[in-house]
Every structure is written in structure tokens, then in C-alpha cells.
Image (spheres, rainbow, N blue to C red):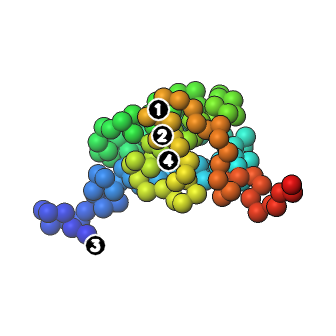
Amino acid sequence: MPREEGGGPAPPGGGQPAVEAARHLSALVPPLRFAVRDGFAALPRLSAFEELLRGAVARARAAGAPDSAALRGLAAATEGFDQLAGPEKRRALARIAGDLSALIPVPGELRELAARGRVEARAGVSISARPLSPALSPHRGERRGI
């Protein structure tokens, strides 16, 4: 069993604020993966994400996550996310993935989306209208005729 410096057992979860904060934020990865797979096909079925996002940010902060632009970006995304229309939700998810990837490692299928979200946030413009790579495309694996 891990021990703290004083010799007693470490608190559950290892007791390291960064590890605990990352664990709370990693709860956002499965719903993000669900929403973006197959070109956002499952996005309409993503429900209560705003509440999950709000809770993950609050728990990460309570665990000692340092204040950062990425964490503030995640917190800002909690306002009204569930009421956004499809295109706005896709742009919001890109920004969320970008902010999340600045705080924790994200899986491969979210990296392109995260990169777009970071670029969009820096530029202050929407680049999410561009088609996603074949990995995130709803037509993945289909051949297209001429």
C-alpha cells in the first residue's frame, strides 16, 4: 500500500492532485469518443453531457487541478451545451477536445478533433466545417465512384 511522507497510508487514488484531477477529467473521454465516431453519427444521442462536463471540471478543481486556460475553457463549455444545434455542438466538442487534450492525453480518434479545436480557439474562427479525416468520417471504408 502506498504511504504518505508521514508514514501513513496514502489517500485513495494515490493522493496526488494531478493524478486525481486527470482521473476526473478522463471521465469525459468515453462520451466524446461516442459522439464523434463515424462522423458524429451518435452526436444526437449524446445526452446530459453538459452536466457530466460540469461535474468533471468541479471534481478536477476540488482535486487540486491548477487553474489554466484549458480548464477555464472546459468550464465555459458547460453553459448551454445540451441546447446547441448539431453544427454548434460539433464545434463545441472540438473546443472541448482541444482543451481536454491540453490537460490529459486523449486517444488517437480524438487527436485530430482536439487539434482542430485548439486551432479554432486560437484563431477565433470556425474551421469545423471542413470534412474530418476518413477515421472520423461517416463513410469510412466506402469507395466513392467518379
1 or 3: mark nearer the eye: 1
The structure residue drawn at horizontal position 68% and vertical position 56%, both measured from the top left corner, is: 134
Residue under the point 33% across and 56% down: 19
Report the Cα–Cα distance between label 4 and label 3.
39 Å
- Cβ atoms at labels 1 and 2 below 8 Å apart: yes
Frontmost of labels 1 and 4 is: 1
**Which amino acid is tagged 2?**
Val
SS for tag 2? helix
Spatial CA distance of label 2 from label 3 is 43 Å
Disc nearest the viewer among 2 and 3: 2
Separation (CA) of disc 4 from disc 2: 6 Å
User: Which residue is found at the position 67% from the left and 45% from the top?
Assistant: 131
Marks 1/4: CA–CA distance = 12 Å
Q: Quadrant of residue 62?
A: top left
Q: Position of residue 139 (x, y in %)?
A: 77, 55
Label 3 crowding class (10 Å Cα cut-off): few <14, some 14-19, many 20+? few
Circle 1: element type = helix
Residue 123's tag is: 1
Q: Give the label on residue 119, or none.
A: 2
- Name the residue that disc number 4 marks: 115
Q: Tell me the CA gap for discs 1 and 3.
A: 47 Å
**Label 1 – label 2 distance at C-alpha:** 6 Å
Q: Is residue 67 left or right of residue 88?
A: left
Q: Are marks 4 and 2 in contact (CB under 8 Å)?
A: yes
Residue 110 in view, yes or no: yes
Per the image, the residue denoted by label 3 is 1
Badge 1 or badge 3: first in the primary sequence: 3
Image spot of residue 5 (x, y percent):
14, 63
Q: Within 10 angstroms of label 4, few (less than 14), some, or many (20 or more) residues?
A: some
Identified by mark 4, the residue type is Ala
In the picture, measured across the screen, residue 65 lies left or right of residue 5, that is right
Q: Residue furthest right?
A: 145
